Image (cartoon, grey):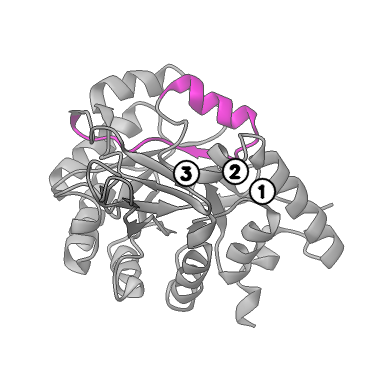
Amino acid sequence: MTDLTVRIASIEMANPSMLASGILDETGESLLRMMTAGAGAVVTKSIGLAAHDGHRNPCIVEIPTGYVNAMGLPNPGMEEFAEELSSIMPSPAPVVASIYAASAEDFALIAARMENAGAAGIELNLSCPHASGYGMEVGIDPASVSRIVSAVKDAVKVPVMAKLTPNTADIVSIGKAVQDAGGDAVVAINTLKAMVISPEFARPVLSNRYGGLSGPAIKPVGVRAVYDLYKSLDIPIVGVGGIENWRDAAEYIMAGATCFQVGSAVGRVGPEVFKDITAGLELFMDSYGYPDVESMRGVAHE
């Protein structure tokens, strides 16, 4: 019988699918809904020190191949969200808290609060392309990434993973910085910096002008990033970007991912996408003789 269970450090998942940060993950109720829908783990909305409104509307545009969004990291702040997280503990599936900050010290402070609230792991948002002073702006410098990962590892006992930006000339050097600083995994990739212009109004559609492209359009970029990282890293890789069906998931795993995250497809397909992907993946693995996910991981390199 095919075994879909996977593990990243102490985070054990019944299947390799995870809800990606940024969609239906702002409340305890929505997180539980994604678990019921079949997600092996869920990642929260990125949480900062204090409440933040994000960018004004319009902040998301649907395009034929995905979304371009500039939400601007809206969130209720760590104290209010910690209460929300605590309300669903113990949870049926692991909850990974996505966090962002402008300094290593603040990252460590938020991470400790999320661990205290019951988070099974921490995801460092080092890759948001549309929030000034955060995300990609700190995540493209290996030295900054190293300081942040080290500080958070010193502050918590749960696994720490860093979400990497594709908006860099050398994603592998960033991945190595995470590994060398003691990080437990990397998540690749976040959205690509993008823009949509309205011909009728002759101006950018998003209030922030620039946004992040997600959905099927970015899948080949994500697969390539995972493939490159796998060749150089010893820590697990979580693949994300454009996954909507079992074939997409299989590509990421064969490129080297231990597990994968699904985000835009929750909106484009619906929450049932988790069960559809894992069911299809199980049938494929059974048909092609892969007894477990680990046996399939990285086979495209052979």
Q: What element carries label 1?
A: loop
Look at label 3 and name its amino acid: Ala
Q: How many C-alpha atoms fall within 10 Å of the one at disc 1: few (<14), some, or many (≥20)?
A: some
Q: Where is residue 294 in the image (x, y as percent from the top left)?
A: 65, 63
In this rendering, the label closer to the viewer, 2 or 3: 3
Is residue 84 rendered to the left or right of residue 136? right
Q: What element carries label 2?
A: strand
Point out the tag, 2 or 3, that comes first from the N-terminus.
2
Pick the front one: 178 or 53? 53
Q: Name the residue under label 3.
A: 20
Is residue 51 rendered to the left or right of residue 122? left
Pick the front one: 263 or 145? 263
Q: Where is residue 263 in the image (x, y as percent from the top left)?
A: 50, 44
Q: Name the residue under label 1.
A: 5
Q: Quadrant of residue 110?
A: top left
Q: Position of residue 265 (x, y in %)?
A: 56, 44
Badges 1 and 2: C-beta atoms under 8 Å apart?
yes
Q: How many C-alpha atoms fall within 10 Å of the one at disc 3: few (<14), some, or many (≥20)?
A: many
Mark yes or no: residue 11 visible.
Answer: no
Badges 2 and 3: C-beta atoms under 8 Å apart?
no
Q: What element carries label 3?
A: loop
Q: In this view, does 193 lie above or below 33?
A: below
| Residue at 29% across, 75% down | 169
Is residue 111 rendered to the left or right of residue 133? right
The span shown in magenta is: 27-50
